[in-house]
């Protein structure tokens, strides 16, 4: 009877060790889920910033490409003048008849990258001897911008941008996005 009494008094339950192991396993599962959530949110934010930077910088690249493609030169001159890697000057053909003497009255466009201020400006002039108009800032938060010209007069453009968190100062934890393209001036297809 004593044996039967001992078996009947044994209560079903968890020992302290079993309880500690269960709490530890639940904690590791919650930690893993939290780590996955944090990583996915960081990836989503990075992708979102990259998309925003690309959507802000693409129209700028498109505008520069359009102006370069409209450049016109004659007698081995492509109509493009590069000063270093941060400044490009583009001569566009006006509506007057194209004669060599007529090129002095053609409008010009100048794009300048300012590395100290992280922006690109666009200036225009109505003729080669006319003064440049006031500079219009067409892109901000530009970390790098280079223009280069190949032997075939093809112009390569590379713009690296970083989006700011609040629009006022560059946030260096946000990712860099680089847009690169090449374009041939119209003069290459006409010569």
Image: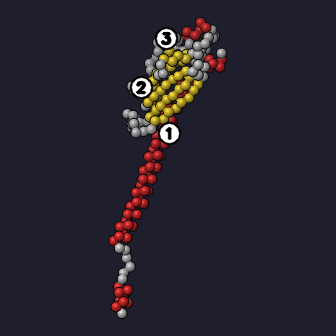
Query: Horizontal placement of 48 versus 182: left or right?
Result: left
Q: Outermost residue, right direction?
A: 190
Residue drawn where x is 36% and y is 83% of the image: 10
Local secondary structure at mark 2: loop
Residue 51, disc: 1
Residue 115, disc: 2
Query: Horizontal placement of 108 versus 1: left or right?
Result: right
The mark that comes first in sequence, 2 or 1, is 1
Q: CA distance from mark 3 to mark 2?
A: 27 Å
In this view, the residue in front, 17 or 164, is 17
In this view, the residue in front, 47 or 8, is 8
Q: Quadrant of the N terminus?
A: bottom left
The mark that comes first in sequence, 1 or 3, is 1
Q: CA distance from mark 2 to mark 1?
A: 23 Å
When the figure is inspected, residue 118 is found, relative to residue 84, above or below; the finding is below
Q: Which residue is tagged 3?
A: 130
| Spot occupied by residue 187 in the image (x, y as percentages of width and height) | 62, 17
Residue drawn where x is 42% and y is 60% of the image: 29
Q: Residues within 10 Å of mark 3 (few under 14, many from 20)?
A: few
Query: Horizontal placement of 48 versus 3: left or right?
Result: right
When the figure is inspected, residue 26 is found, relative to residue 97, above or below; the finding is below
| Spot occupied by residue 167 in the image (x, y as percentages of width and height) | 40, 35
Q: Are marks 2 and 1 in contact (CB under 8 Å)?
A: no
Q: Quadrant of the C terminus?
A: top right
């Amino acid at each position: 009877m004593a044996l039967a009494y001992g078996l009947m008094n044994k209560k079903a339950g968890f020992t302290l060790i079993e309880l500690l192991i269960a709490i530890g396993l639940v904690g590791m599962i919650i930690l893993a889920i939290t780590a996955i959530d944090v990583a996915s949110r960081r990836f989503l934010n990075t992708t979102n910033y990259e998309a925003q930077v690309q959507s802000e910088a693409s129209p700028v690249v498109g505008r520069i490409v359009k102006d370069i493609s409209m450049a016109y030169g004659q007698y081995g001159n492509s109509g493009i003048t590069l000063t270093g890697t941060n400044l490009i000057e583009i001569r566009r053909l006006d509506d007057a008849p194209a004669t060599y003497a007529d090129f002095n009255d053609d409008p010009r466009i100048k794009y300048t990258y300012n590395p100290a201020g992280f922006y690109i400006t666009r200036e225009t002039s109505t003729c080669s001897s006319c003064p440049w108009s006031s500079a219009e800032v067409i892109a901000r938060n530009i970390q790098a911008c280079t223009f280069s010209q190949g032997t075939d007069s093809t112009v390569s453009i590379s713009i690296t941008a970083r989006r700011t968190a609040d629009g006022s100062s560059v946030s260096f934890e946000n990712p860099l996005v680089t847009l690169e393209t090449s374009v041939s001036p119209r003069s290459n297809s006409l010569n």
